[in-house]
Image (spheres, rainbow, N blue to C red):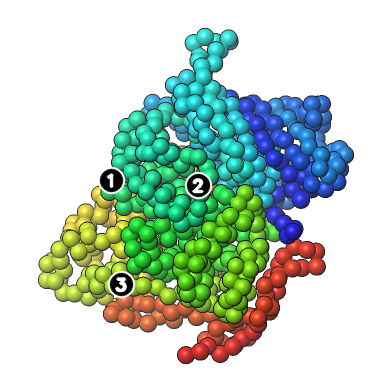
Amino acid sequence: MVQIRDPNTCANFNEVTIENIKFDWFVDFERTRIVGAAILNYRVLKDTDKIILDISDQTICSIKLNGKKCKARNGEIPLVGKYLLLDGEFISGQKGKIEFQYSTSSSASALQFVEPSLTADRTHPFLYSQCQQIHARSIVPCMDTPAVKQTYTANITVPKGMQCLMSAVLLDDEGRPIKNEVNENEQFVQFNFLQKVPIPSYLFAIVVGGLVKRDISKRCAVWAEPSMVNIAHKEFEETEKMLEIATELMGEYRWGRFDMIVLPPFFSFGGMENPCMTFVTPTIIAGDRSLTTVVAHEIAHSWTGNLVTNASWEHFWLNEGFTEFVEYKILGKMFGEQFRLFMHLLGWEDHLRMCIYETFHPEHPFTRLIVPLDGQCADDVFSPIPYQKGAALLLLLEQRLGDPPRFEQFLRSYINKFAYRSIVTDEWMDYLYEFYDDKRSILDSINWNNWLHRPGMPPQKPTFDETLLKTCKTLANKWLYSSDKEINELKAFEFEEMMTAQKEKFFSLLDVVISNGNAHSFNHKRIEIMEKKYSLNTTGNCDVKCQWILVALQARWEPIIPIALKFVSDIGRVKYVRPCYQRMFEWIISRESALETFEKNKPRMHNFTIQFVQSLLNNKNKMGEMKIATENNINEQNVENGIAVCEDIYLSKEENSKEDYRNDKNKNRKLVSPNGIKTATNGCQKIKKEN
């Protein structure tokens, strides 16, 4: 059994585990807090004299240990967080319970209270939570680590006329009226929930608002404010189809329901995979289902992440890399294999490479697939790296092993073996070798050490299908290099008939040429013509609008500034807000207005989004102004049909030459340190790349 380490928790989870939590909460909108009780049922794994829980600024009124009042000691570990320590004699195998009467802080990091004026219908206040990565400790004393999974029940009391939802099965849609003996004019209703599948604390979730429901199928529904629910229902009509494809691919769906809740626009993410009740942003409602690929991603999490979970945030790629890979599998079965491989190509070129060379730099430790988090907040390392680098590794494995149906069989077998558990990378790798015992030589050809532990671009590149890319390149070249007469004759349908992913790539290709200073004819006059032909300033597709804004800012087209400022003021999704602010901060003409807008918007932005935008100002993620490779990493560019095409080069620290790497047979499979915690070893052997 692997001993798990998690540097982002104070909890002694290797000695004690939490098996179930019972929540009894009252949502206090007036004071923006949650008040009530939580009962933690624990089991002792090995003899110990303490139970340590993560906390964050709760007001604790009383604590009972196995029915008796007790005291606890508070403490704090720098760069990890605050904790609560209960002394006692705890014997292996013993079970017991800890009961807390408490209230959250009005500034609990997991909770976002939204004023009615900032909701779609402006009739009710709104509450939603975001516990990932390490914010569950702000709403309940707990073992706030993905290594611990627990079931839960909940009784939640909210003001009458409001609907409560959680990451659990709602036992009664209507709720139960609660009599207020203090003030008869103030009425409440109680909702009851059951989550019978063990989940990590980051999947605790609650929503309260003026919400209504529309069924999509027997097990799928969408919840939203009344003015949005019919639009959302139409947008997400294919959810059941996606879920059926995912079930065929990954095996039994074990959560009962897959419902969705449309949150206010300041939610930081496209979606959040809370079991039974996925959170989605209204920014994916484009009116033509073109952005509902996010739903496929959250559905995939029902197996990869929620059922089989990374044991610590150092192994986050086990959640997101697998989920991205399965998402593309689902989309491939819906739209074809070319589309699946095109999505992988976009992930590699426009998300992974851009993150490594622009957000960070090629030697930055955050660009590793497994990121050591000692002394580092798990939130700070959030990026596309675990998503796209992880998905690329799985695609490479599928292609090298040469039998996609068998690889899908491996995915199902992997899920069944580790279901309900939290694991680390070596456990996955051991099972991979066990399942493919007949293909060990192929697995040994994977450069495991560099894939998992080295920063920068991966040492080996999967094969992508560029069929859909050609359309993007052709149109981009026309705008870059055609005559004015040819530009005026361009037809809008060439752009409009593209899929959203192709439109994003089209803008990305323009952006690369403009940013590199290559010779082109894409001047301000052409930008104006493009906007009129494609109605880009008014498009309802946020992915397209964001990419358009980025290109126009890169080209220093001043009319885009008010459009960009309104865009980042209307939404809070990090995917859009961070790059738009970054471009505006970098341009002296837009910088001051962008700073003013950021300060003005802070009160309604989620803490997570604020943190990311602030990091741009603090320059935390860059070393100086580095946007390209360091002296040990080179990013060469060739020009193909007028478009800059990057070729990835992985260089050793010893020699400045183009090399590929791989490990000696089995040399790096067992990564175990003397203390029993698995770590990296440098067992790679340099070989000459074969032609």
Report, in whole angstroms, how far the alpha carbon at label 2 lies from the one at label 3.
34 Å
Numbered disc in front, either 2 or 3: 2
Q: Nearer the viewer, residue 576 or 370?
A: 370
Q: Nearer the viewer, residue 684 or 220?
A: 220
Q: Secondary structure at mark 3?
A: helix
Instruction: Tell me the number on the disc at residue 287.
Output: 1
Q: Earlier in the sequence, mark 1 or mark 2?
A: 2
Report, in whole angstroms, how far the alpha carbon at label 1 lies from the one at label 3.
27 Å
Q: Secondary structure at mark 2?
A: loop
Q: Is residue 607 left or right of residue 492?
A: right
Q: Which residue sits at x=43%, y=39%?
A: 219
Q: Please indicate, yes or no, whether residue 465 appears anywhere in the rendered image.
A: yes
Badge 2 local density, few (<14 within 10 Å), some, or many (20+)? some
Q: Earlier in the sequence, mark 2 or mark 3?
A: 2
Is 151 above or below relative to 667?
A: above
Q: Is residue 127 left or right of residue 204?
A: left
Instruction: Tell me the number on the disc at residue 253.
Output: 2
Badge 3 local density, few (<14 within 10 Å), some, or many (20+)? few
Q: Please indicate, yes or no, whether residue 84 appears anywhere in the rendered image.
A: no
Q: Secondary structure at mark 1?
A: loop
Badge 1 local density, few (<14 within 10 Å), some, or many (20+)? few
Q: What residue is disc 3 on?
A: 467
Is 30 above or below relative to 611?
A: above
